[in-house]
Amino acid sequence: MSPLHPGHESTLPDVDVVVATRNRPDLLARALAAIAAQDYAGVVRTWVVFDQCPVDPSVTRDDVRRPVTALDNPRAPGLAGARNSGVLAGSAPLVGFCDDDDEWLPTKITAQVHELERTGAPTSVTGIVVVYRDSQTSRVATRDELTLANLVRHRVMAAHPSTVVVRREALLGGIGLVDEEIPGSHGEDYDWIIRAARHGSFAVVEQPLVRVQWGQSMFSQRWPTIVAATDYWLAKHPEFHADSQALGRLQGQRAFALAAMRSPGARSAIMQTMRTRPRELRAWLAAAVALRVVSAERLMDLAHRNGRGI
């Protein structure tokens, strides 16, 4: 990356931003407006990838500093393929991601480019503001939290994909593109952030610079996908099996999903989780759902109100 000299736009690296979208024009318009409003003095080029829906050419903008290009997703249907389509369409030395229902705060890119230059790290993330119904919760990860061991043990929600800015050479090289084989693209960001942690350290901006809307994806209706994706991660990443706390967490999430879908396999999944880690809270929550003491939706709602997931 070229040295950064504030006030000299020619020295600032271009940034490609990939926004994958599907039939959410109002939310998309808000996300694009927030990207256009960045105070970054360099060029921010946005690639809007329309996944499994018609391309809307009206989002295109022929602007010198904030151009927007609309394209379709010729790769695997879903979020992973759409993100990769946008990445491969661009050529800027830095690549960022923004979900179509999230909003960047104006200083985000400037802060991250400076932190990338200062640290030399391949990837940068910021904190988030979780917006769920009538509540807002700031979640900011520290540098110490974003190690491979800690990311395996704890899914650090503050390291959200809409906060990521990564060097293209790392994205196309040691880290790799988004995994298009993950069932339903569920948790593709978690898989990617683990690979990013294997590749190198993070340039962390310890400020909440993205407003993240929770509850839009309606995963309460996609429990089978969650089970399949969790099985995929467990088969792919040996790190989970080397840490009983990490393994118990994923097994507990899997058991919770099975309980939510009233699967006959829920009981054995709950018992497996308790054998791995008897104190794993998700196993007990799954048991409560399986016994119909409380609904999965109610527990998800309570977690989201506190800026967390199950």
Image (tube, rainbow, N blue to C red):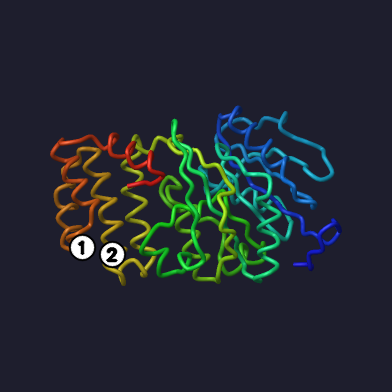
Task: Give the class, few, some or many, for how many residues have Cα within 10 Å of label 1's Cα (few <14, many ≥20).
Answer: some
Task: Give the class, few, some or many, for how many residues have Cα within 10 Å of label 2's Cα (few <14, many ≥20).
Answer: some
Q: Is residue 175 left or right of residue 10?
A: left
Q: Quadrant of residue 170?
A: bottom right
Rendered image: mark on residue 77: none
**32 relative to 180, above or below:** above
Q: Position of residue 200 (x, y in %)?
A: 55, 71
Q: Is residue 65 left or right of residue 218?
A: right
- Residue under label 1: 277
Task: Determine the residue positioned at 79% across, 67% down.
Answer: 2
**20 relative to 249, above or below:** above
Q: Which element type, helix, strand or loop, lies under badge 1? A: loop
Quadrant the N terminus occupies: bottom right
CA distance for labels 1 and 2: 7 Å
- Residue under label 2: 245
Q: Is residue 266 left or right of residue 38?
A: left
**25 relative to 270, above or below:** above
Q: Quadrant of residue 278?
A: bottom left
Which sits earlier in the primary sequence, circle 1 or circle 2? 2
Which three-letter amino acid code belongs to the residue tagged 1?
A: Arg
Q: Position of residue 165 (x, y in %)?
A: 63, 57
Which three-letter amino acid code belongs to the residue tagged 2?
A: Gln
Q: Position of residue 11 (x, y in %)?
A: 83, 62
Query: 187 or 34, which lies in front?
Result: 34
Query: 190 or 121, which lies in front?
Result: 121
Task: Determine the residue positioned at 51% across, 66% down.
Answer: 143
